[in-house]
Amino acid sequence: MRTNSISLIIFFYDHYYLYFKVSNQLFMKLYKIFKLLPLVAIFFLQACKKESPISPQPPPAPPTPPTPIVIQAPPAFGFYVVGYFPSYRNNLSEVPDIKFRMCNVINYAFFSVNSTGTLTINNPTLVPQVVAKAKANNAKIFVSINEAAANNFKNMAVNSTGRNSFIKDVMANVRLYNFDGVDIDWEYPSTEDGTDVTFTSLIKELSDSLHRDAKYYLTIAITSGKYAGKYRDAIKNEVFGYADMFNIMAYDDFSTTLQYKQHSDYPLAVTAIDYWVTTRGMPKEKAVLGFPAYGRASGITQTGTTLAYRNILEQGGSSQSDSAIITSNPAFPAGYKVYYNGQPTVRLKALLAKQRVNGVMMWEKWQDAPDANSLLKAACDAVGRTY
């Protein structure tokens, strides 16, 4: 019995040994197989990639470039008829709508350069009224800028900092009041004190700001050009390219010693055009011939001895004449004539402007007669402008 037990033990030992041996060998083979599986999977995936390539993603779109800044003059709009409207004319109803329709440009005069180099707005409550009336009658409205005191222009324009501050204030007011442009009335830059140079810089820089995207106009009031010297020569030819219009003030050629002198005769208009357009080369499309709606007595002081055209007619003058003896005004000594432009002379000047330049300008709208005797009417009728 013992012998049989031992034999049985030996039998189970032999068989289990064989079983574990075989199992171990099988395990080792399986282990080696499973160990190779990742490599097989990688190989398979690589093969799939070669057989079925993935389309590459398109590169991101380049950023949109910024819109370039365009600096150019706004479009011209035909033969100009310009009328100034002063800030001190509070009663807007005294200038009828038809007088606004006769013009395609109204200059509100003035905003003024102050001692800080920024703008003082003269009669701010009137500004939006004039702007609205101009636009309602299809006229563009510009702000005309002078100086509140002598040398304010000069002191402001002396360096780039002052000019930059001034131009920022100008642009802010142009946008605020909905002006269509700016008229510079610096009377006058000079070759004697260097303001001819700073004036040129100011006009160039102001032009760049106003002409951005061809949005706003720039005009300049200049002398008649009759007399050579520091004021006439301060207007450099390069300025002709910066501004869009030049209002030639062909008037105020008066004398305090000669009794019989017309301050704005027809020959002065011819002289002004000859000088600025023919001699200096101002583009005729930018030249505008000015005429006055007021008269001056000659041979006496010019303080208090000017008279609006409408008042001259009220005090005995004729719309068909260029002079009148005023007896009812104590400012004029007995026997002194006041010299002005009547309708015949304005018609001739308007025709001259139509032939040789591109517009007429009148200082100023209130002074003109409000009826059929209007000088502005005479000019429009002569050039065929409908209103």
Image (cartoon, rainbow, N blue to C red):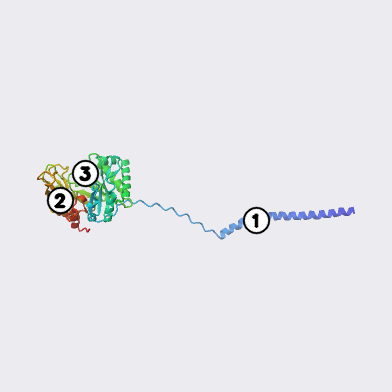
Nearest the eye: 39 or 228: 228
| Image disc number at residue 37 | 1
Nearest the eye: 317 or 211: 317
Mark 3 Cα shell of 10 Å, populated few (<14), some (14-19), many (≥20): some
Kindly identify which residue carries mark 2: 314
Residue 115's quadrant in the figure? top left
Q: Of the residues under marks 1 and 2, which one precedes in the sequence?
A: 1
Where residue 386 appears, x then y in whole percent?
22, 59
- Residue type at mark 3? Asp
Kindly identify which residue carries mark 3: 233
State the residue at coordinates (74%, 54%).
25
- Residue type at mark 1? Leu
State the residue at coordinates (87%, 53%).
5
Question: Label 1 vs label 2: CA separation?
Answer: 117 Å
State the residue at coordinates (71%, 55%).
29
Nearer mark to the viewer, of 3 and 2: 2
Where residue 224 appears, x then y in whole percent?
19, 47
Answer with left or right where residue 119 lies relative to residue 319: right
Looking at this view, name the residue that lies furthest to the right. Answer: 1
Nearer mark to the viewer, of 1 and 2: 2
Label 2 secondary element = helix
Image: 48 above or below 197? below
| Image disc number at residue 145 | none
Where residue 21 appears, x then y in whole percent?
76, 54
- Residue type at mark 2? Glu
Mark 1 Cα shell of 10 Å, populated few (<14), some (14-19), many (≥20): few
Question: Label 1 vs label 3: CA separation?
Answer: 97 Å
Q: Of the residues under marks 3 and 2, which one precedes in the sequence?
A: 3
Answer with left or right where residue 19 lies relative to residue 296: right
